[in-house]
Image (cartoon, grey):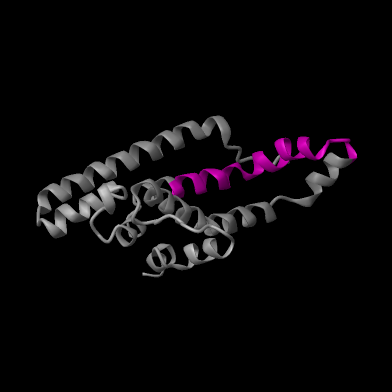
Amino acid sequence: MLWRKLFERDGLVNNLLGAIGFYQPPGWITNPKFALWTLVLLTVWQFGSSMIIFLAGLKQIPQEYYEAASVDGASKTRQFFSITLPLLSPVILFTLVLQIITTFQAFTQAYIIGGGSGGVLNSTLFYTLHLYIQGWTYHEMGYASAMAWVLLIIIGVFTAIVFKSSDLWVSYGTGE
């Protein structure tokens, strides 16, 4: 409910915008033009866990590679594209797969912001929320189950595409 209170007409975000001079801040969750963008903002806000994974990946790159590249005269840009990016590519693959799965399963934010019904003019009616409504509101469990299987297949196809393409851009070698 905290997200909902942040973006209501008299919520924290609108109060802050009013304090800096916006006299009629928008209804973030009541206006269909802004409701989806509010969910995008909340999703970007939650990208911190992926940043921790990237930081762990960066810490695993041996400093000696950068020192050797500096001795050889490589610029910082060249070091990034020749050392950092190739050695970080398995972490990028892992994070990409996690984010694809998480994106297709987006439910909680849409449920809370949209009040469990898809919001104003169904502006936040994601597939997973529609699945939930079909199963638990209309008691169409067979239909909801079929939708869940379709979602599983779609996630599987996207994940398979990423894994198949990973041979082209993921480097597992350490360069030694």
Any magenta on residue 47? Answer: no
On the image, the x and y values in percent for residue 89 come to 60, 41
Figure quadrant of the N terminus = bottom left
- Write the residue at 83% across / 39% down: 69
Residue 90 in which image quadrant: top right
Q: Nearer the viewer, residue 171 or 88?
A: 88
Figure quadrant of the C terminus = top right
Which residue in the rendered view is the most extreme toward the top?
168
Q: Nearer the viewer, residue 27 or 36?
A: 27
- Decide whether the magenta segment is chiefly helix, strand or loop: helix
- Write the residue at 27% across / 46% down: 127
- Please give the range of residues in magenta: 71-99
- Write the residue at 83% across / 37% down: 75
Q: Is residue 109 left or right of residue 41?
A: left
Any magenta on residue 85? Answer: yes
Q: Is residue 29 left or right of residue 79?
A: left
Q: Nearer the viewer, residue 14 or 110?
A: 14
On the image, the x and y values in percent for residue 130 come to 22, 50
Which residue in the rendered view is the most extreme toward the front?
23
Q: Nearer the viewer, residue 152 or 6?
A: 6
On the image, the x and y values in percent for residue 162 come to 45, 36
Total numbered circles: 0
- Write the residue at 41% across / 65% down: 3
On the image, the x and y values in percent for residue 47 come to 52, 55
Q: Is residue 127 left or right of residue 18?
A: left
